[in-house]
């Protein structure tokens, strides 16, 4: 059912997504959908979160490589059809506050936690400075993508690797090519 909701979100966006249409295409009823996801916002954010795969990645031996992989996963998420427009919807003043809260808790917060955990491991391993401002670093990591999207700039080849390297160095780390 979440896969069907993802398709509907990508094709029509959140406002036009219909729980009835999702249920019909998934071969079930609206009532069955609402038993699992009590609102359209709940269904939509569960669908988007299902794409993120936060729970499927396990830390590797190299925190820098883990950082690059987290950024690649972020890039895949925001590059999917309608990914950036969903972010815009979350920033709109008229967006349902429940939708915004669910999106933040299911999509934004897990990504930020994953990035922060990688950076904390790097501090613990002595790979970056212990007094580095990790909160600002996490914002810079994903914020660079949004800034490009807003400015209309194309995403450069190797964005994840290049962004990780710049922030890593800014935190006192060394990147070897």
Image (cartoon, rainbow, N blue to C red):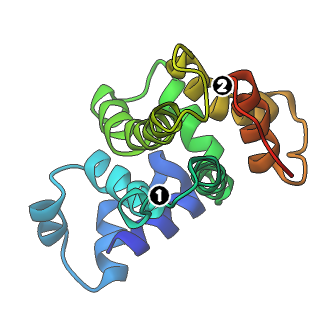
Q: Residue furthest front?
A: 126
Q: Please, what secondary structure does the residue beneath circle 1 have?
A: helix
Q: Which mark is residue 140?
A: 2
Rendering coords of residue 140 (x, y %) = 66, 25
Quadrant showing the N terminus: bottom left
In the picture, residue 99 is in which quadrant? top left
Between 78 and 6, the residue placed more toward the observer is: 78
Which comes sooner in the sequence, label 1 or label 2?
1
How far apart marks 1 and 2 lie (CA) works out to 19 Å
Q: Secondary structure at mark 2?
A: helix
Asked whether the beta carbons under mark 1 and mark 2 sit within 8 Å of each other, the answer is: no
- Mark 1 = which residue? 52
What percent of the width, then of the height, locates residue 176? 82, 47
Residue 27 relative to residue 91: left or right: left
Please state if 114 lies on the left or on the right of 28 as rendered. Answer: right
Q: Toward the viewer: 103 or 41?
A: 103
Q: How many marks?
A: 2
Residue 37 at x, y = what percent?
18, 57
Residue situated in front as seen by the camera: 50 or 24: 50
Residue located farthest toward the bottom when viewing the structure as drawn: 27
Check disc 1: other Cα within 10 Å, few if <14, some if 14-19, many if 20+.
many
Q: Residue at x 40, y 37 (%)?
A: 113
Front residue of this view, candidates 100 and 49 = 49
């Amino acid at each position: 059912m979440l896969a069907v909701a993802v398709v509907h979100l990508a094709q029509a966006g959140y406002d036009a997504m219909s729980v009835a249409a999702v249920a019909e295409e998934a071969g079930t009823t609206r009532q069955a959908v609402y038993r699992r996801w009590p609102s359209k916002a709940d269904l939509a954010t569960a669908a988007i979160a299902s794409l993120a795969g936060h729970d499927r990645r396990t830390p590797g031996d190299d925190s820098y490589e883990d950082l690059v992989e987290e950024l690649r996963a972020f890039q895949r998420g925001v590059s999917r059809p309608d990914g950036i427009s969903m972010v815009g919807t979350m920033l709109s003043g008229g967006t349902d506050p429940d939708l915004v809260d669910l999106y933040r808790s299911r999509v934004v917060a897990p990504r930020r936690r994953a990035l922060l955990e990688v950076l904390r491991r790097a501090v613990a391993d002595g790979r970056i400075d212990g007094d580095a401002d990790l909160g600002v670093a996490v914002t810079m990591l994903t914020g660079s993508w949004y800034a490009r999207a807003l400015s209309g700039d194309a995403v450069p080849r190797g964005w994840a690797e290049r962004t990780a390297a710049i922030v890593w160095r800014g935190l006192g780390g060394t990147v070897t090519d």
